[in-house]
Amino acid sequence: MALLELSERGLYCPAGDFYVDPWEPVERGIVTHAHSDHACPGSRSYLAAAPGEALLRQRLGSDAVIQTADYGAAVSIGAATVSLHPAGHILGSAQVRIESAGEVWVVSGDYKLAPDTTCPPFEPLRCHTFVTESTFGLPIFRWAGADEVLREIQSWWRGNQDAGKASVLLGWPLGKMQRVLAGLDAGIGPVYAHGAVERVNRIYRQRGIALPATPPPTRETRRALILAPPGCQGTPWMKRFGAASTALVSGWMRIRGTRRRRSLDRGFVLSDHADWPALLAAIDETRAQTVWVTHGFRAPLVRWLEEHGRQAVEVPVRQPAPAAAAEECES
Amino acid sequence: MKLFAELYAALDRTTKTNEKVAALVRYFAAAPPADAAWAVSFLIGRRPKRLLESRKLAQWAMEESAVPDWLFGECYHAVGDFAETIALLLPPPAASTHLPLHFWIEERLLALRDAEDETRRRSLVSAWREMDEGQRFVWNKLLTGEFRVGVSQNLVLRALAETAGASVETIAHRLMGEWQPTPEFWAQVLASDARDADASRPYPFFLAYPLEGAVEDLGDPRQWQVEWKWDGIRAQLIRRQWRTFLWSRGEESIADRFPELEALGAALPESTVIDGEVLPWNKPEGIPLPFAQLQRRIGRKVLGHKILSEVPVVLMGFDLLEWQGEDVRERPLEWRRGQLEALAQPAGALVVSPLVEATSWDELRGLRQQSRQRKVEGFMLKRGGSPYRVGRRRGDWWKWKIEPYSVDAVLIYAQPGSGRRASLFTDYTFGIWDNGRLVPFAKAYSGLSDEEIREVDAFVRRNTIEKFGPVHAVKPELVFELAFEGIQHSPRHRAGIAVRFPRMARWRHDKKAEEADSIETVRALLGT
């Protein structure tokens, strides 16, 4: 029995009459996490994992009706029982487990298996159908350990200090920057954050996650590490740092072309998404007979799974409008 | 290999020229001479030819990575670079080789050339297992003959000059011609004695910049020597030690392709070097044949009597660099030209590029209109009294080219680029109207800003109507002004027309697809 179907507004569960990560305003939406391609404002009511509430409110507006559930707690919705489980992606990210009439489906949202001190680890769940993301669904995507990448970042920072240059590290303001901050040796020098990053840092700190202090950049930045959203590259906001070295931290930095196209000094490969081996391992652990593949390199992962004896289906996502995809630098 | 892969990464990482030069200087100081010689040869673009077919390399990489053929293809499309795709796909590295670059090149890479396939496969797989990802990438680039790195020849010369304590010009000259990347060669590059031992060695070509701003800014036209700008193969003809050498600007030795010019060389006085343009020549009319005729001739393996008589060539000489064993590049332009004129025989294979006489820029402007009829690209302007310089320099030589042709065409197919443009749609095919249908007319890859490329990329993703492998057919909506240099009939092209150097001059946001040009308009250009 199909617990989910793809509708005009995203994944819909008829048994419980709700959507998961709806693309448009709906009556009831369960939201896996607070990134804009998953959390769309305007719905009548939302259900999300408790640790992500404040992040979600920032995205959805102060008057949004947000119901929260602790990880693992069962919530009955119509003929379905729903529970949310850690996805290991960012603070408050959840997989959605839906059970109805003996059938179990799990929607992964975005996830990773690698350790991250800013959120609880991905919880493997058994299910009949697993809806997986595939942002990095090609075998060229394989991540080194976060510790190694952090060491590279620190040695780049120290090198810039020796050359008398500021270090500007660009990355997604929600999740990526906090993961970097939490693992960083803040004894190297001052760390400053762009307003968009700092707003998220505050929420993480309120949730009890220890992050070094990140005031706004001061006048003297030559020894500093500055954390900013990718959209800041090439904007007037960057001018104050003079001849800074600019780096981007993202899974996409694995490909030389994407690194060079952006004229970056460095690209650090650190992602909050599962790499290819992790995608396959996560799918294996669910023991699902059917896998729905969404977000990213869908076709290759579907074909791989089919060639390895599973049923797999491509689930399209709505292309985000150009404005929504833009990386903002408003502080 | 470790040092060289690190150098590659350092050069790749920065866009700042001073940092690149500093990285090169550090490398030249640290590398053993045998490594440095190979590195120089790779850095200035003398890369080994492809040593084995990509298909085999891909096959062995797929086996080693346990990845099927189709998935390799998907990865390649995402990465846009063959050598990099393999480096990223291979199992995680367990080692990082400390063996020097010259070992890997001489003992392992070049040894692949004559080996059996099974030996090659084993050698490659074991090489991959001994290398980290950065090393594998550089190694694969060398294997596939695609080694390129983000430094211009000028930067390499600067770094070598700094290392050797010599001038950039001296270093440039030492790197010309035929040489082997050996420790002895490296010693010669760094030597304090500047004497030149190699008879074949050409001089670095002096290259002109396009004219910037108004031609009037150059001052009095009588201070300038004006010649037509010829469209052929720029080449240096060398006669030394009873032998003739002909070098193209790409530093290929091309004497054997042009027996007429070998004969010309044999008649020159000992120790003479002429700079000029190899042109297919219409003798009766005294004008060049279409460039495509020369390409037809270059394409032939065997130069029979027929092709030699149909497409004869001349050297359109315009400068003299060496005379009676002396490097005369520092002598004034007029002196060099005078000696050159004395070398030309009536109806010989050396034609001296005629001077265009005029008393005003306006008069020259008028004469420039004749360029297309004369089968030339416009004018070359050379400052009176100037020396022959090294490389591309502003000031003494300018090219004053005629306006390119232009046609408004519609974007009909797009395909992802490679390298820096991987996974972006950057390679476009444009159509023009033919009886209410768009026929493919030209491909163009350059001319748009990064911003515009991103916009077109987004358009392609939203408006794909059909896919043929990596090629996407798109809704015919975007109009671009294409500029190009030459136009000819061509039975091999769908529109029956081939153009030279097409590029995007402008995005015509103001035009609808229906307003693009038609095949009739384009055919009309054939007559001009």
Image (cartoon, coloured by chain):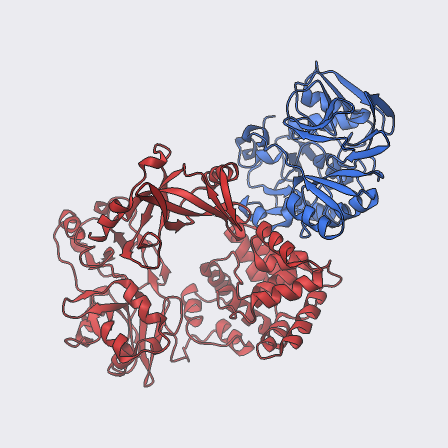
Chain colours: A blue, B red
In the image, is residue B388 above or below residue B524?
below
In the image, is residue B389 above or below residue B358?
below
The quarter of the image holding the N terminus of chain B is: bottom right
Looking at the image, which is closer to me, B282 or B433? B433
In the image, is residue B364 above or below residue A46?
below
Q: Quadrant of residue A105?
A: top right
- Residue B162 lies left or right of residue A14; in this view the side is left
Residue A79 image position (x, y, % from top left): 82, 23
Residue B322 image position (x, y, % from top left): 29, 74
Q: Given the current orientation, which residue lies at the most extreme bottom position?
A: B242
In the image, is residue B189 above or below residue A47?
below
Looking at the image, which is closer to me, B355 or A129? A129
Residue B180 image position (x, y, % from top left): 50, 77
Q: Given the current orientation, which residue lies at the most extreme top position?
A: A63
Q: In which quarter of the image is residue B314?
A: bottom left
Residue A248 image position (x, y, % from top left): 63, 42
- Residue B449 lies left or right of residue A75; in this view the side is left
Would residue A160 be visible to someone looking at this image? no
Q: In which quarter of the image is residue A41?
A: top right
- Residue A100 lies left or right of residue A143; in this view the side is right
